[in-house]
Amino acid sequence: MVVEHAVVARTKGLGEASAVRERLEAFVGDVARGLGRSERRRNAALYVRGMLEAGGRKSLEPVVARLGGGPLEYDSLQQFLADSPWDPALLLGAVAERVAPKIGVEAWVIDDTGFPKDGRRSPGVKRQYSGTLGKVGNCQIGVSLHAVGRQGTLPLGWALYLPEDWCADPERRTRAKIPPEIGFKTKPELALGLIEQALGFTIPMAPVLGDQAYGDNSDLRRHLDAAGGEYVLSIGRGTGVFGPETMFAVAERRKGRGRRPSALNPDRPHETVEALARRLGPESLARIACGTDPTGAERFSRFGFVRVSAAHPILRDQRAPRTEWLIIEWPEGAEGPSDYWIANLPGDAAPERLARLARLRWMIELDYRQLKGELGLDHYEGRSYLGWHHHAALVTTAHAFLTEERLDPKAPRPA
């Protein structure tokens, strides 16, 4: 059921309330067509309006109260979030296909964020490290995929991380309504699943960016490369590589019987990316533009670019060498490099593009800030696994509406 009175959209910059409501209803009506039943579409519109409504907590009870609803509206929205079997990917895909072309997508970014929680019944909650908290704390972890463009950012998908002890606990799984087919997956595996899901949307794929937790995972890099995807991923200073001078050859066959050797062996030991960067020295660096600051002014830093082969897939997995870019950032005046990335972009990729992609990942911090600070992404208090994903998809819809409003020159603005 839906509250029939007009909702006053007080979110900054949305313009006159009745016009905003009309545009919001049209937006949600378009992207929610795949949800099926009309009651689901009405509840989607109501919930998104609640996320945009100014106020404090964006959990269900205060949202319904601010919108003027009562017990019937609360029960309907509760069932829509926690139990209704609609696929959040249908909503996310429709939002992406409508809004992504408007932001000039340059990259996809994988990341994860923490959701502090009390107790132990919310799905996936436990004491675990969260970059959001900067320490170990009682929290949920959500993995996300975002499109980043010249005109803004857009979440493309969400996956709740379930620690192994959660996956192995039938009682907690039942209480949290975790489907039986959902098993343990690492964060990089969840990220790959989100990328595969987004590849089913009618939007172009873009180079994938991610921090060290994802860049250090050689399986993720291999799967992306095998799927024809490009990536620029952060890696640790201790990552082993074979430098550009390395030659690979098949070992000679030993005397006697046996299978002919096929693995390519390096003619020298591998070295860490930090050792390689220091061996090449500051003279190998160039001052290159790598993006803009919040004022729009161009940013510069010193970068080095060298062709390498990652050691782990060769030595541990017995895979053929694959030549990639190692990107080194060594700021002016610093005693050593500050960051390293590995990228499978073509050998003729422009240094300026490599440097810009390396630094572009930080833009999604703006996503998290708005999704959490303004739109209530971390305010979901339900204990349903599906409900968490429904909530994230609906918050993404609210975020996308704000992006479209900001980019639409015809939308009325406050006097």
Image: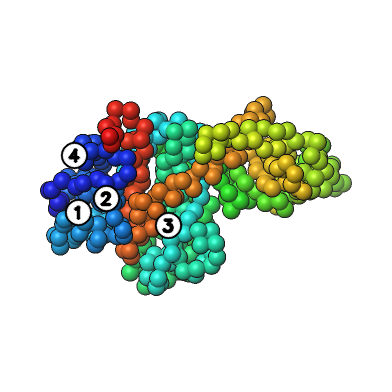
Residue that badge 4 annotates: 18
Residue that badge 1 annotates: 67
Q: Residues within 10 Å of mark 2 (few under 14, many from 20)?
A: many
Question: Which mark is first along the chain, 1 or 2?
Answer: 2
Residue that badge 3 annotates: 160
Q: What's the CA distance linking mark 3 and mark 4?
A: 36 Å
The answer to whether residue 347 is visible is yes
Question: Which mark is first along the chain, 2 or 4?
Answer: 4
Q: Nearer the viewer, residue 114 or 408?
A: 408
Q: Nearer the viewer, mark 2 or mark 3?
A: 2
Q: Residue at x 44, y 40 (%)?
A: 153
Residue that badge 2 annotates: 53
Question: Which mark is first along the chain, 4 or 1?
Answer: 4
Amino acid type of disc 1?
Leu
Residue 271 vs 182, above or below: the answer is above
Q: Nearer the viewer, residue 113 or 287?
A: 287
Quadrant of the rendering where the C terminus is positioned: top left
Q: What's the CA distance linking mark 1 and mark 4?
A: 15 Å
Amino acid type of disc 4?
Ser
Find out whether the residues at labels 1 and 4 contact each other: C-beta distance under 8 Å: no
Q: What's the CA distance linking mark 4 and mark 2?
A: 13 Å
Q: What's the CA distance linking mark 2 and mark 1?
A: 8 Å
Q: How is the image coloured?
A: rainbow
